[in-house]
Amino acid sequence: MSAGHRGRPQPRAAALLGVLALTLGACSTEPNQEASVEHEPAAPPVDIDADPVQVQSSAEEADLDAIHLPVSLTGLVSVDPQWDTPPQVHDGVFLAPGEQDGRLVFSAVSADGTVLWTAERPLSCSGFALTSAGDRSLAVLTDLADPTGSGDSFGTTTATAYDLNTGEEVWGPVEVPGPHQGPGLVFAERGDEPLGGTGQRVALDAATGERSPEGAEIIGEFFGTTVIADDGELAAFASGRSGELWRAASPSAATAAEGEVPVSPATNRLPPGSALIGSSEDGFDLWDLTDGEPLSGGLDDAMFDAMSETWVAIREDELAGFDSAGGELWSVDLEAEPTLLGVGGVMAYLLADGEELDIYNVVTGNTARVYDPLEDGATAIPLAFTETGASVVDTGTQILLVTEVPGSAEDYAGEGDPFEDRP
C-alpha cells in the first residue's frame, strides 16, 4: 500500500544548484579547467566578508498558497531562509547556504524561525559541518586563504569554527589538505580524477582544530567523536581529550575484502552518539558511539525519530524499525528501490523508484496518510526535524523551515478535520 504521491515536482534544476551539487564540500584550490576555455569573459571577483554577522531577526514568512504540507505542520508558522541546499541541524539550529549576488551566504536559523547569524563565502566554498566540543555546538565553514597576500593565488583551503548559536569564532582559520569530505570534520586532498578518490584523509579536533595523527585511517568525526580503523578494529577518541574512549572489533572490517577500510556516509544524518560504519556495497552497522556497541547490521541507510525514539532503516529490500537499543520492532517488504528522505514526527518519508512518495508510521510500520487529499499544490516533504518539532521541508523548488511556532488562529480558522468527508 502506498501513500501514492506521484507527480512530485522534479528536483531543483537551477544552474546554481547544479554547481552546488558538483562542488558539495568543495573549496577548490585549483582553477576550473572548463572555465579556462575562452567562451565568455569571467565574472569580476566579488568581495567576500567572511566574518559572521549577528542578525537576530525573523526570517521572511513563506508563501504557502501553492504548497501542500503534511497536516500536522499546517498550523505552524513557515519561513523561507533563502537556502539553496537542505540544511544540517544540531542543537535546535539549522544551517545551510544560499546564493546571493555572486556569494554563498550561510544562514543559521533557530527552530522558531529567527536568523541568528550569517556568514559569506565564495561560491566554490560550499563545504561545512556541524559538530560539538563538549557542551558547545559548532559550525565549521571552509574558505580560501591567499598565502601570498597578492590575490593572484588560488590559495589554500582553511576551516574555521564558530559557535552555532552566536556566530562567535572559536578557532581557526586552520589549513586543511583539501576540500571538506565528511562525515563531520574530515578533509582530504583532491584526487587526480574529477570523480576519483582522495588523498590522505584528516580529521580536525572539534575543540581545538588540531589535525588527527598522521597515518590514521579516518572513518569520520561525529559531533566531537572521531572514529578510526586500526587493524580490523574501530577506535574512538573524544575532542579535546587524549586517549581512546573505546576500542572494539568491527564486524564489517572483519568480513571486508583484504585492505578495505570501513567507511561512513559522507553526510551524517544521525543524532550525536551514533554512526553508520561499514561498506556502501555490503551494508553498514549502526553503532552506539558512547559505548562502542553495534546496535544493528547490514543496513543501507538509517535515521532516528526523536519523538518516538525509534530507528528506521533500509535493509536491502526491507524497511525496518528498531527501538533505541537496536531491538527490531517491525519490518516491511519494499517492492521498489527506496530512498530514505526524512524521519520525524513519528513518520518516515521514502521515495520509491525516484518518483513515488511512501509514508510509514515508525512505531507500527503501517503506511500513513499525512496530506489532505483534497488540497492541491507542490508536495512539501519533511527532511529534518528538531526535538521540538520544527522541520525543514523540500517543495521541489524551495527549501522552507516549518517552525515550532503556532500560527494565528485566524490563519487556520474553518479548516476542521482535513480527512472528514466533504460534499
Image (cartoon, rainbow, N blue to C red):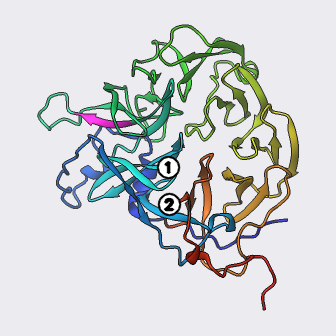
Give the amino acid type for the residue marked by disc 2 in the picture: Ile
Secondary structure type for disc 1: loop
Q: Which residue is mark 2?
A: 399
Circle number at residue 87? 1
Residue 29 visible in the snapshot: no
Q: Quadrant of the N terminus?
A: bottom right
- In x, y percent, where is residue 327? 85, 34
Crowd rating for badge 2 (residues with CA inside 10 Å; few <14, some 14–19, many 20+): many
Residue at 40% of width from left, 28% of height from top?
Answer: 189
Q: Are marks 2 and 1 in contact (CB under 8 Å)?
A: yes
Report the number of numbered marks: 2
User: Residue most toward the bottom?
Assistant: 423
Is residue 357 shown left or right of residue 219?
Answer: right
- In x, y percent, where is residue 122? 29, 46
Span colored in magenta: 141-145
Is 129 one of the magenta-colored residues? no
Mark 2 or mark 1, which has the lower sequence index?
Answer: 1
Q: CA distance from mark 2 to mark 1?
A: 9 Å
191 above or below 203? below
